[in-house]
Amino acid sequence: MEIEKILGRHSPLQENLLNILHDVQDAHPRKYLPEPHIRKVAEYLDTNLAQLYGVVKYYTMFSTEPRARYIIRICRSPVCHIMDGKTLPELLEKVLGTGINEPTPDGLFYVEYSECLGICSIAPAMMVGDQIYGQLTEKGIEKLISLIRDEENQKG
């Protein structure tokens, strides 16, 4: 990943900070913000490194720890919880073989919580990357994970 190329797509203005951080994180195969990249963003925006880390640590969508190619976000809103969302962590652990905040052994998936995805009409819900999935069942989750793994295997 060439961070300079990503930075070049944005003007060095503070109002571009979140977009820059998202682009840098999304470009990394493990979907996180390594310390050298955070330093380059701080230099590019001519901002204090501590302030930049404050932003990164405040927003749960950012991570300074390696994750995986596909980030799965489980909605923890009351609506999802009532609509049987409380079983999603167990279902995903069963299907993926890993728990919350742990990458799968193949480095393909990482599961984390999100306070609310804002899609209550299709609860229980989760996101895989930027894609939203709702009205989830065990069978649906198994099929989705299987499809993603098949696509990755075809890529080689």
Image (cartoon, grey):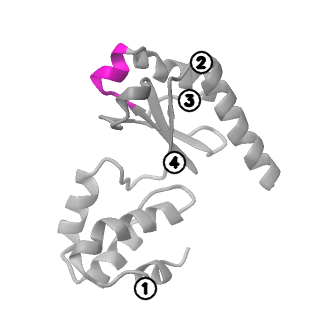
Type of amino acid under label 2: Glu
Q: Measure the C-alpha gap from mark 1 to mark 4.
A: 24 Å
Q: Position of residue 59 (x, y in %)?
A: 27, 51
Q: Position of residue 113 (x, y in %)?
A: 38, 34
Q: Secondary structure at mark 3?
A: loop
Q: Position of residue 50 (x, y in %)?
A: 19, 67
> Is residue 35 positioned above or below 56 on the image?
below
Q: Are marks 3 and 4 in contact (CB under 8 Å)?
A: no
Label 3 or label 2, whichever lies nearer to me, is: 2
Q: Identify which residue is drawn at 56% across, 29% down.
A: 98
Q: From the image, tell me which residue sits under label 2.
A: 138
Q: From the image, tell me which residue sits under label 4.
A: 129
Q: From the image, tell me which residue sits under label 1.
A: 8
Residue 78, magenta (yes or no): yes
Q: Measure the C-alpha gap from mark 3 to mark 1.
A: 37 Å
Which label belongs to residue 108? none
Observer-nearest of 127 and 91: 127
For residue 20, which quarter of the picture?
A: bottom left
Type of amino acid under label 4: Gly
Of the numbered discs 3 and 2, the one sitting upstream in the chain is 3
Of the numbered discs 1 and 4, the one sitting upstream in the chain is 1
Q: If the image is split into quadrants, where does the N terminus sit?
A: bottom right
> Is residue 90 positioned above or below 7 on the image?
above
Q: If the image is split into quadrants, where does the C terminus sit?
A: bottom right
Of the numbered discs 3 and 4, the one sitting upstream in the chain is 3
Q: Are marks 1 and 4 in contact (CB under 8 Å)?
A: no
Q: From the image, tell me which residue sits under label 3.
A: 98
Q: Measure the C-alpha gap from mark 2 to mark 4.
A: 19 Å
Q: Measure the C-alpha gap from mark 3 to mark 2.
A: 16 Å
Q: Secondary structure at mark 4?
A: loop
Q: Measure the C-alpha gap from mark 3 to mark 4.
A: 18 Å
